[in-house]
């Protein structure tokens, strides 16, 4: 156990660095948990046990474990990390040990104890079962030797000659950094069809204690992107790289749907790191104000024995160095194939994946006073969030309104799964029996590389005449007294009981004057409209923009950062899709530029549009923005849509005037 005590003593230097980080962290919820790499191991196997302190405050600098029944082969290895997600700062310390079992059986590792914020806390216990190894397994025979004195060992000996966290004299720090901390991107596919999902996972690999902060996220240009929510703070997993164990943190996981064909790139992510190294050099005498002279540390290991440990150390008291190191992931190229044109159904609207469809009407019989509701629900896996409404062939006797769209996306699903419902309101204008054609929805199945078409049953509708006739709706309640006026041969004397002096007489007398006044007002209004056509067009354009951004305005008011930027981006692309009659899945920035240029929209407006869409995309992957930034983005979106409407209407009005 003296070797184990030496390990604990030497690790105090590293712990001091992380205690300082914990003392300056924001106050968050504290947790102290125990984790193991496996709950069942063989005698010839090892197990890694980790004690994790999340958001510790006033941490004493030591974690005291109890590994009865196991031999400590390696550890403690200490790692500190800070994460920033949506403005929330989380800090944690992890203490890892590699253990070798001493005998088969059922073991309970009690929770470790630590002093945090002036009180003793304990982590949860874990159970580990040790079974006998296979016939050829070499079972280490560990015989305890209580009389044997373990040799004193230096810090470098504890961690091994080649431990990456130790810098010996003459060693290249840059080479250690390059080999022991990097960012990697994993994609499940590099060749896909338009609209087919790609899963991109960005991982930070490290064997060094470090504070890491993601400073730049990929823009994912040419893709529609949806993030998978990750644990906060991130959890480390262990992976072997060329035989060396690395702690691996997933820093971003995103579902990508290419919006255009060609060679697309996943931009790199950038991570800033503050890497902590131990430098071994000449002997240093501790100053009077050295923190290791504090009674807290002397009490931890029996007072004077602590000083004796360092005075006999063959190496010396180590120094520490924090090295800044910026890394970025490699650029990943993705080949996107266009969807085949052969066999493409007329009802295809850009859906890619595997889907089912249901179509239901809430009633089969109604009067002309009522309205019926048609619900089309499309569910499955694929680009659910990009689905467009299936085309409907509605008889002219029905008035159709734009559908309301309801999304039900499964949280953190991969592949993206869920449903999108389109709800139409249909109002019959005439009585009769009508057959509504089946609803058709087509999608492309990338696995089969073929188009599929789903068809509902036709709908038979019986419409009866309601109380309100079509003529009633057109007359809008015109006073029937005017229709009953007839010119007769009766006397127009004051004594006439039928007409003269009655209110109707005075109305007819004033009617010509009112008519002249109405004509004069109408002509002045027309003159105003002619001379202020640009102003009226701008008012209309502004109404269009406000209507499109209605939901985004609500999210802005509620302070929902991510929802606001998602809805703003969706509103802009939805407006462009509707304006140019291009399905959402086929809409690309280049296509929009071409369409706007063909309509003679100014370059300044196009630049503002593309800049705004990039800004919204970046905001989805960056930390939460301020309310001023969101307000600015909303105002810019209103101005951009208004400007496009204004210029398109102005061009149409100018052409009509010619």
Image (cartoon, rainbow, N blue to C red):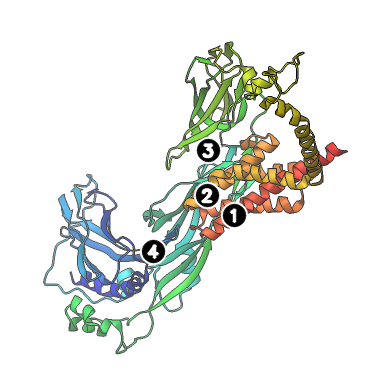
Q: Residue 385 carries which label?
A: 3
Residue drawn at (45%, 57%) of the image: 86
Mark 3 and mark 2: span between their CA atoms? 16 Å
- Tell me whether the residue at label 2 lies in contact with that at label 4, contact meaning CB atoms closer than 8 angstroms: no
- Tell me whether the residue at label 4 lies in contact with that at label 1, contact meaning CB atoms closer than 8 angstroms: no
Disc 2 secondary structure class: helix
Please identify the residue farthest to the right as the structure is shown.
658
Q: Which of marks 3 and 1 is nearer the N terminus?
A: 3
Name the mark nearer the viewer: 4 or 1: 1
Name the mark nearer the viewer: 3 or 2: 2
Please identify the residue farthest to the left as the structure is shown.
147
State the residue position of label 4: 81
Mark 2 and mark 4: span between their CA atoms? 30 Å
Q: Which of marks 2 and 4 is nearer the N terminus?
A: 4
Give neighbour class at mark 1: few <14, some 14-19, many 20+ (Cα, 10 Å): many
Q: Is residue 653 left or right of residue 226?
A: right
Q: Using the image, determine if residue 508 lies above or below residue 525.
A: above
Query: Can residue 47 be spotted in the picture?
Result: no
Mark 4 and mark 3: span between their CA atoms? 35 Å
State the residue position of label 1: 633
Residue drawn at (76%, 35%) of the image: 518
Disc 4 secondary structure class: strand
Q: Which of marks 4 and 1 is nearer the N terminus?
A: 4
């Amino acid at each position: 156990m003296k070797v184990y005590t030496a390990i604990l003593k030497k690790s105090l230097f590293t712990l001091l660095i992380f205690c300082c980080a914990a003392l300056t962290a924001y106050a968050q919820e504290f947790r102290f948990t125990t984790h193991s790499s496996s709950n069942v191991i063989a005698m010839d196997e090892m197990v890694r046990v980790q004690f994790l302190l999340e958001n510790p405050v006033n941490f004493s600098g030591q974690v005291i474990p109890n590994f009865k029944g196991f031999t400590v082969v390696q550890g403690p290895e200490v790692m500190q990390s800070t994460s920033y997600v949506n403005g929330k700062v989380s800090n944690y310390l992890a203490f890892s040990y590699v253990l070798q079992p001493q005998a088969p059986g059922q073991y309970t590792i009690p929770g470790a104890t630590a002093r945090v914020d002036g009180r003793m806390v304990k982590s949860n216990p874990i159970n580990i079962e040790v079974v006998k190894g296979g016939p050829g397994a070499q079972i280490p025979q560990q015989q305890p030797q209580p009389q044997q004195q373990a040799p004193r060992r230096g810090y470098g000996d504890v961690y091994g000659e080649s431990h990456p966290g130790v810098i010996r004299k003459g060693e290249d720090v840059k080479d250690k950094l390059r080999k022991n901390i990097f960012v990697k991107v994993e994609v499940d596919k590099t060749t896909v069809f338009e609209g087919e999902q790609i899963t991109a996972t960005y991982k930070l690999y490290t064997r060094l204690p470090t504070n890491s902060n993601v400073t730049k996220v990929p823009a994912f240009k040419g893709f529609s992107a949806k993030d998978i929510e990750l644990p906060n703070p991130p959890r480390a997993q262990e992976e072997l790289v060329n035989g060396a164990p690395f702690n691996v943190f997933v820093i971003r996981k995103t579902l990508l749907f290419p919006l255009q064909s060609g060679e697309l790139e996943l931009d790199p992510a950038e991570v800033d790191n503050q890497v902590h190294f131990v430098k071994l050099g000449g002997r240093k005498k501790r100053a009077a104000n050295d923190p290791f002279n504090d009674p807290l540390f002397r009490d931890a290991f029996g007072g004077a024995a602590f000083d004796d440990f360092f005075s006999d150390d063959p190496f010396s008291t180590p120094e520490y160095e924090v090295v800044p190191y910026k890394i970025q992931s490699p650029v990943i190229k993705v080949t996107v194939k266009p969807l085949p044109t052969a066999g493409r159904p007329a009802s295809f609207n850009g859906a890619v994946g595997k889907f089912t469809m249901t179509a239901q009407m809430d009633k089969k019989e109604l009067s002309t006073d009522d309205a019926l509701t048609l619900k089309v629900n499309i569910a499955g896996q694929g680009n659910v969030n990009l689905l467009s409404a299936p085309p409907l062939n509605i008889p002219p006797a029905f008035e159709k309104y734009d559908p309301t769209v309801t999304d039900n996306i499964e949280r953190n699903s991969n592949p993206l799964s869920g449903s999108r419902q389109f709800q139409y309101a249909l109002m019959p204008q005439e009585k009769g029996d009508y057959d509504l054609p089946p609803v058709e929805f087509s999608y492309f199945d990338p696995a089969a590389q073929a188009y599929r078409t789903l068809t509902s049953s036709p709908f038979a509708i019986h419409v009866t005449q309601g109380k309100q006739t079509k003529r009633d709706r057109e007359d809008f309640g015109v006073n029937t007294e005017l229709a009953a006026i007839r010119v007769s041969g009766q006397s127009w004397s004051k004594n006439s009981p039928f007409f003269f002096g009655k209110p109707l007489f005075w109305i007819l007398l004033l009617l010509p004057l009112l008519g002249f006044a109405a004509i004069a007002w109408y002509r002045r209004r027309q003159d105003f409209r002619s001379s202020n056509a640009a102003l009226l067009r701008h008012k209309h354009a502004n109404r269009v923009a406000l209507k499109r951004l209605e939901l985004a305005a609500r999210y802005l008011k509620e302070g929902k950062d991510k929802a606001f930027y998602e809805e703003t981006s969706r509103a802009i692309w939805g407006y462009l899709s509707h304006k140019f009659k291009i399905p959402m899945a086929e809409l690309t920035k280049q296509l929009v530029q071409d369409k706007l240029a063909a309509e003679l929209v100014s370059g300044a407006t196009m630049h503002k549009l593309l800049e705004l869409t990039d800004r919204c995309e970046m905001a989805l992957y960056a930390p939460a923005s301020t309310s001023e930034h969101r307000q600015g983005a909303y105002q810019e979106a209103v101005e951009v849509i208004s400007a496009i409407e204004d210029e398109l209407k102005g061009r149409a009005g100018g052409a009509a005037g010619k």
